[in-house]
Structure formats: structure tokens, C-alpha cells
Image (cartoon, helix red, strand yellow):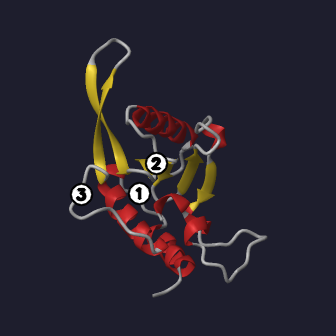
Amino acid sequence: AAEPAPRVKALAAAWEGNTANEKAVFEMWWIAFSEALGVPGPATPPTGDDRFELSIPTIERDGRESTNYIDYWKAGHAAVEAKASEPGRSNEQLLIKAFGQVRNYAAYIGAQPPYLIVVDVPKTLIVWDRWSGNFGGFAAGKRVALATLHEPPPDSDPQADRRGTLLPCCR
């Protein structure tokens, strides 16, 4: 099998310029992304611990009960919220909103994951970790342009196995 970096680069090239909405592409893209990283993809069939569209019963500010959904959930690993920004528009507010959503939804789960991820399919990946005790605010996220995810950091060993550094939450 090819190393992750060339697979991730090929994935970025294949999805470059995609303008389909999040609902149409996220699940297909996440499976391809997992394969490119060389990590297990979502469970087949889905389980409560590893699935797309995990339902989260919530209570709104006015006391109403409602159901929201985490776009992808892998217990003990990550909660992912996906968005797909419109071409030519700033996506910052969209990503801030997505972070607020996934952080709030994860709070309703008994055991919070170590990572929260927001994906602007297929442009940007932002990862928050809670190793310091909490996820911090939006600015605490580590942002990576998906088109350059395959590139090693300037001070890294080019021969190193980068599966864990490309996306540590999905190992």
C-alpha cells in the first residue's frame, strides 16, 4: 500500500473545486479520507460507538427537547461536524458555528471524546484536543488546509510514519 502522504495528496486533488453541499458529500469524503490516511474508516454496519449521524437529545434554552446530530462520532476518538462553504465566500463564521455545534453536542454525551473536528469539505480541517482539560475556544483549534495536509511540517523527519500526525484522533 502507498504511504499516507501521496494518498492524501491524491484525495485533495480529486476533491479540489468540489462545490456540492455537505449533506451530499461528507460521508463519502470521510470514508475516502480515512482510507487515504490508512486508518480504519467508519464501522460497517454502524454501531452506537462508531457512526455517521449520531442522534443527540438536547434541551433548548426555552426548555423544549430536540434532537441534533453529530455528523460523525467515534467513541473515545472524535466528534466531527462537517460543513461545505460556498465558493468565494468567507467560511470563518460557518466554521465558528460548526465548532459551537460540535462542542455543545459533545457535552451531551457522557464521555467526551479527546478530539473535536470541524471539516469544511474538502477545504479545511480544524482539530481541538482536550488534553489540557477542555477544548478551549475556536482559536485553540489547529487548522490545516486539506490541500497541504500531505506536506510534512518543516522540522519533521520526511521518512517518519505520519499516520498519527496527519490525524491522531482516528488511529
Q: Report the disc number at residue 46.
A: 3
Considering only order in the chain, which callout, 3 or 1, is on the residue closer to the N terminus? 1
Counting other residues with Cα less than 10 Å from the Cα at mark 1, is it few (<14), some (14-19), or many (20 or more)? some
Residue 39 sits in quarter? bottom left
Separation of marks 1 and 3 at Cα, in angstroms: 27 Å
Considering only order in the chain, which callout, 2 or 1, is on the residue closer to the N terminus? 1
Mark closer to the observer (1, 3): 3
Residue 108 in percent (x, y) is at 38, 31
Q: Is residue 103 left or right of residue 22?
A: right
Counting other residues with Cα less than 10 Å from the Cα at mark 3, is it few (<14), some (14-19), or many (20 or more)? few
Going by the numbered disc 2, the residue's amino acid type is Glu
Name above or below for residue 37 compared with residue 43: below
Q: Report the disc number at residue 92.
A: none
Name the foreground residue: 118 vs 163: 163
Residue 57 sits in quarter? top left
The residue that disc 2 covers is 86
Separation of marks 1 and 2 at Cα, in angstroms: 7 Å
Mark closer to the observer (2, 3): 3
Residue that appears at 45% across and 75% down: 38
Task: Residue 18: tell me if it is visible.
Answer: yes
Residue 114 in percent (x, y) is at 52, 47
Residue that appears at 29% across and 44% down: 54
Going by the numbered disc 1, the residue's amino acid type is Thr
The residue that disc 1 covers is 19
Separation of marks 2 and 3 at Cα, in angstroms: 30 Å
Going by the numbered disc 3, the residue's amino acid type is Pro
Counting other residues with Cα less than 10 Å from the Cα at mark 2, is it few (<14), some (14-19), or many (20 or more)? few
Residue 138 in percent (x, y) is at 60, 37
- Residue extending farthest to the left is 45
Residue that appears at 46% across and 61% down: 170
Q: How many marks?
A: 3
- Residue extending farthest to the bottom is 1
